[in-house]
Image: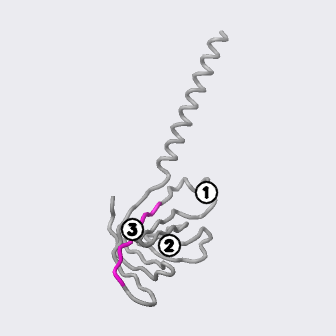
Amino acid sequence: MIKTKIKTLLKYIVIFIFILLIAYLFVTKFSINELKFKCSGQLTSDIDKQSKIVYTKLSLYRPWVHIWSKNNCDGDVHLEIPNEWVEYYECLQRNGDQLHIYKEHSQEHLVGIFSLLSKALSIDLGPFGFFDGLCVPTD
């Protein structure tokens, strides 16, 4: 009788651990949707205007990430001008079909906008100037 109860208890413990493991794997695997783009456009500075290619990775958080997240951001952004510059922006805020890009979680200074509709990127790159271009998805 006691052995049967122990076996039943162990069975429920194993099932519970298995369910927790599946839930953990689901949350960690499917909490971020990454979109990668190659953006061609103009980089305008005080000195000149030149054609540039900017590679962009948008990491969009799934809705359930806000359950444990301390910030009000919907994602983050990595930008790269090959062999010249790499930058990370901590906060994306979704506003309809636009993603507002902020340098920090505080969301005090809007530095750029990415349009999900037209795939256009407009962003202030600080000392490099202002980039404005159209993007195409990459692998």
The single residue placed furthest to the top in the displayed view is: 1
**Helix, strand or loop for disc 3:** strand
Q: Which mark is residue 9?
A: none
Q: Which residues are magenta?
A: 50-59
Q: Position of residue 106 (x, y in %)?
A: 62, 70
- Seen in the picture, residue 51 relative to 138 is either above or below; the reply is below
Question: Earlier along the polypeptide chain: callout 1 or callout 2?
Answer: 1
Question: Earlier along the polypeptide chain: callout 1 or callout 3?
Answer: 3
Which of the 4 image quadrants contains residue 137?
A: bottom left
- Which residue position is annotated with label 2? 100
**Helix, strand or loop for disc 2:** strand
* Residue drawn at point x = 41 percent, y = 85 percent: 44
- Which residue position is annotated with label 3? 55
Q: Position of residue 64 (x, y in %)?
A: 54, 53
Q: Name the amino acid, label 1.
A: Ser
The single residue placed furthest to the front in the displayed view is: 83
Q: Which mark is residue 69?
A: 1
